Amino acid sequence: MTFQTNFPLYPAKLPFVTVSSKGMSNGLSDIPNDGADFGPDTLLRTSSKGQYGPPYTQTSGIQEAWNYAFANAVEYTNYGTGNYWMKPILLLDGVFTVNQKVFLSPSVRIFNPKMIGSGSMSTYVMWNFNDNCIEIDHTNGNIRYSNIEISSMQPVGGANVGPGTAFFAANYVSGDPAYQANVFQSYDMDFSNTFNGNAMFSLTGFQNIILYNIEAYDGGTYGGLYSENTNTVQILGSIMHGHYASFYLNNVNSLVMYGTETGGSGGVLSNVNFVHIDYYEAYSSLIINGNVGYIHIENIFSPTPYPFLTNQTNTPVTIDKLKIDRLNVIANTFTFTNSSYITVNDISIDTINIASGASINIPILSTVSGTTAGTVNLRFRDYSTSYKKLVITFSGYENDTTTNQTISYPLPFSTTAVITANNTGLTISTSTTGITITSPNSTTTYSGIVIVEGY
């Protein structure tokens, strides 16, 4: 009788390299590395499977797994010679203790460096030395035009981790072979402990950075991300907190941020050309420490009394254009800025919703009481270097005196201001800094609008 089966009768090759936190050397398993390819029982610095210590790995097998993945990468000649793809590294559940830096410096060109865990609350990577936990050799051009991914784990930095350090660092400088040539992406990372280092990720000189569902609570000086000299950054569905700021971007072409909360301190923007933020909860200030070209915010919710924009360098900075489509002030007072060092050349806010008991303090609008009764509300609909339009609304205005009333604009016109509409029945003149209302000297009340346009 012949035995037939559809199942293979040879060992199946897994599409990834497994690393276990459990082994015989740490008393958590009865078999080496709990059956995984690498783990705490692995021979120090090996690049082969099935090699066991002592001396034991100092990285719970993580460095050795990378060594193996690099050494066994497959060359695909249809992409040209010298281009290699490695198997992804999978960290299983548990606590991985790392006692020395994991340093990535492959001898062949790797297109897909990738290490993922079993989940942000399942895989913990703990290090307690004053250096980066995982670092790419920035002088090595063998990770170039690559997609680098670190995802689905929970880094834990100990008390000995000091300033300037990160969980994962890849800092390329001008002249490096891979400067502005790589993409970094990360998903489902959770940095929940008090961290005394720089940021969860220190990534400079990248082409693109994509972060999704990154949670950095008290995550170092700059929370989730420190980046300079990068083309584009995307921060999506994330929560970032830091001692000084929630993230730091300097000399970056564009930032896209969606559904993200920053707390404690907002993100630092310095020399950023384009910023697009949607569904932003302003629990803290955006820190403008260098010139920014264009900031477009589609939905901003302000439940706290923090100023929207602040500056921490006491150096004059400029925002060329700020556009807010919808501003929702939930509670307290929304203050535009607390810094005289920030100049906004062009500002517009389309829709303002103010909850009961809340208020706003922003430079494009103001409210003034009439001399005897009523109110005068002033709001710029456009305020740019090339065109300005101010709408002034009179409600029950009364001046029962012989003295004219002068009202200053929220912001001045530059050179020219002309009244283009007036249906209030009042005689009003204008200058580049405000209007003067000729006193009617009567108990008559006036309502209507005045439009002032100019440059």
Image: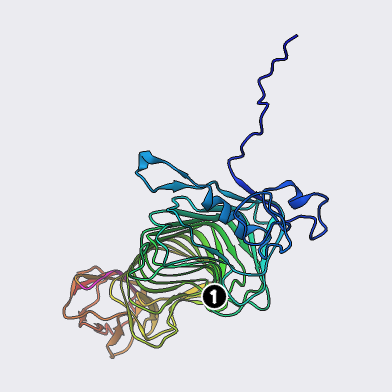
Considering the whole magenta stretch, tell me its main secondary structure.
strand
Display coloring: rainbow
Taking the view exactly as shown, the residue that stands out farthest to the top is 1
Q: Position of residue 248 (x, y in %)?
A: 46, 72
* Left-right relation of 355 to 428: right
Q: Position of residue 321 (x, y in %)?
A: 30, 69
Q: Which residue is drawn at 54% across and 46% down?
A: 87
* Left-right relation of 73 to 16: left
Q: Residue at x 71, y 62 (%)?
A: 56
Residue 275 versus residue 400 in the image, above or below? above
Q: Residue at x 40, y 88 (%)?
A: 314
Q: Which residue is drawn at 66% across and 63% down?
A: 59
Answer with the quarter of the image where residue 28 lies.
bottom right
In the depicted view, which residue is nearer to us: 384 or 403? 384
| Residue matched to label 1 | 198
Which quarter of the rendered picture does the C terminus lie within? bottom left
Q: How many marks?
A: 1
Taking the view exactly as shown, the residue that stands out farthest to the bottom is 403
The amino acid marked with disc number 1 is: Asn
Q: Give the range drawn in magenta.
A: 376-385
Q: Is residue 384 magenta?
A: yes
Task: State whether residue 331 appears in this view.
Answer: no
Q: Does the magenta stretch include residue 343?
A: no
Residue 312 versus residue 176 in the image, above or below? below
